[in-house]
Image (tube, rainbow, N blue to C red):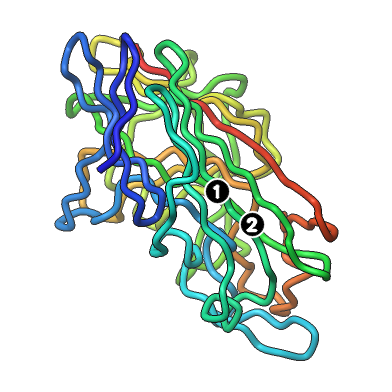
């Protein structure tokens, strides 16, 4: 484990997957991150790259070749190097190699940087195209946050309701469901809510989502500016955590043609291009 800290927070990471594993309030001792118990879900905050979700049939087609990737790509299962670190920040780096090019056709550098800023943790992604060709990729976060108590709720800002896409075997189906919030933007996480896997939210004004305890006190907020948002907890398990997932990309539709360059919400970089984006976890 690698640690960074400031006056308010201490955060812990593993080089495997460049994964945030712990975020602790130094005053109260509260741990905000899920513990990774495999009885519910064995991960904590995987980085999703170069695909968010699934390729249709677990494959993509690019320039006459077929490439296979498992759900959410290989970054979460790769060993990163520590590229830089100091007391309040750390950066991990992953670069393409011949093994990775067997499943993903581009030369790239991926840097995952974490910065403590008062009571916030910035999660920053940097993707560099080192290839001669235009590069196609998706990237996203999958952080799992503890529910403070059994009556904790999810609070959405800027909307009174939203439409959620429904997954079918990990792919986006044509079905949707309308999620109604109360007058305060509150949604109760229930077993029924996640019975059909994640809520996939597109084309919304949602840029901020909080968790609040049974007293109504907010204790954590995720701020982001991404085209897609996922909200997830394991189906049927009534798990004691919820994932708030900012995505630049999403899983393929059930009828997608598998062409890598035509993936919805896919990102492109020209030779030498750089993509940077951040989301923030604020604690109270």
Q: Would you identify the image quadrant in which residue 45 lies? A: top left
- Location of residue 110 in the rendering, given as x and y in whole percent from the top left corner: 58, 53
**Does the residue at mark 2 contact the one at mark 1 (Cβ under 8 Å)?**
yes
Left or right of residue 3: residue 240 = left
Give the residue displayed 39% in from the left and 41% down from the top: 143
Q: Is residue 38 above or below residue 66?
A: above
Q: Write down the residue under mark 2.
A: 138
Q: Would you identify the image quadrant in which residue 221 lies? A: top left
Q: Residues within 10 Å of mark 2 (few under 14, many from 20)?
A: many
Left or right of residue 151: residue 159 = right
Q: Where is the C terminus found, in terms of image quarters?
A: top left
Q: Would you identify the image quadrant in which residue 116 lies? A: top left
Q: Write down the residue under mark 1.
A: 140
How far apart are the alpha carbons under marks 2 and 1? 7 Å
Left or right of residue 58: residue 189 = left
Give the residue displayed 61% in from the left and 73% down from the top: 254
Q: Where is the N terminus found, in terms of image quarters?
A: top left
Give the residue displayed 72% in from the left and 45% down from the top: 275
Q: Is residue 258 above or below residue 270?
A: below
- Location of residue 113 in the rendering, given as x and y in whole percent from the top left corner: 51, 37
Secondary structure found at label 2: loop
Q: Answer yes or no: is residue 261 visible.
A: yes
Q: Residues within 10 Å of mark 1 (few under 14, many from 20)?
A: many
- Location of residue 194 in the rendering, given as x and y in whole percent from the top left corner: 36, 49
Q: Is residue 12 above or below residue 263?
A: above
Left or right of residue 161: residue 1 = left
- Location of residue 91 in the rendering, given as x and y in whole percent from the top left corner: 48, 40
Give the residue displayed 68% in from the left and 40% down from the top: 276
Q: Which is more toward the observer, 114 or 36?
A: 114
Q: Answer yes or no: is residue 192 visible.
A: no
Secondary structure found at label 1: strand
């Amino acid at each position: 484990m690698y640690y960074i800290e400031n006056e308010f927070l201490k955060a812990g990471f593993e080089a495997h997957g460049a994964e945030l594993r712990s975020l602790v309030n130094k005053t109260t001792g509260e741990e905000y991150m899920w513990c990774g118990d495999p009885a519910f879900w064995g991960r904590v905050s995987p980085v999703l790259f170069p695909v968010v979700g699934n390729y249709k049939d677990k494959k993509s087609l690019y320039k006459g070749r077929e490439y296979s990737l498992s759900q959410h790509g290989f970054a979460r299962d790769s060993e990163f190097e520590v590229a830089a670190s100091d007391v309040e920040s750390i950066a991990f780096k992953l670069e393409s190699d011949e093994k990775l090019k067997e499943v993903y056709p581009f030369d790239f550098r991926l840097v995952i940087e974490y910065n403590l800023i008062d009571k916030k943790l910035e999660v920053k992604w940097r993707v560099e195209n080192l290839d001669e060709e235009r590069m196609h990729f998706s990237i996203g976060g999958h952080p799992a946050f503890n529910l403070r108590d059994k009556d904790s709720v999810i609070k959405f800002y800027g909307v009174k309701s939203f439409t959620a896409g429904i997954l079918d075997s990990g792919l986006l189906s044509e079905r949707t469901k309308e999620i109604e919030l109360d007058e305060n933007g509150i949604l109760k996480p229930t077993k029924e809510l996640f019975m059909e896997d994640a809520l996939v939210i597109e084309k919304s004004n949602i840029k901020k989502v909080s968790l609040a305890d049974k007293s109504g006190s907010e204790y954590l907020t995720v701020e982001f500016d991404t085209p897609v948002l996922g909200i997830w907890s394991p189906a049927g398990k009534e798990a004691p955590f919820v994932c708030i997932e900012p995505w630049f990309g999403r899983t393929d539709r059930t009828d997608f043609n598998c062409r890598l360059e035509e993936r919805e919400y896919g990102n492109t970089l020209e030779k030498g291009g750089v993509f940077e984006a951040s989301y923030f976890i604020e604690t109270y």
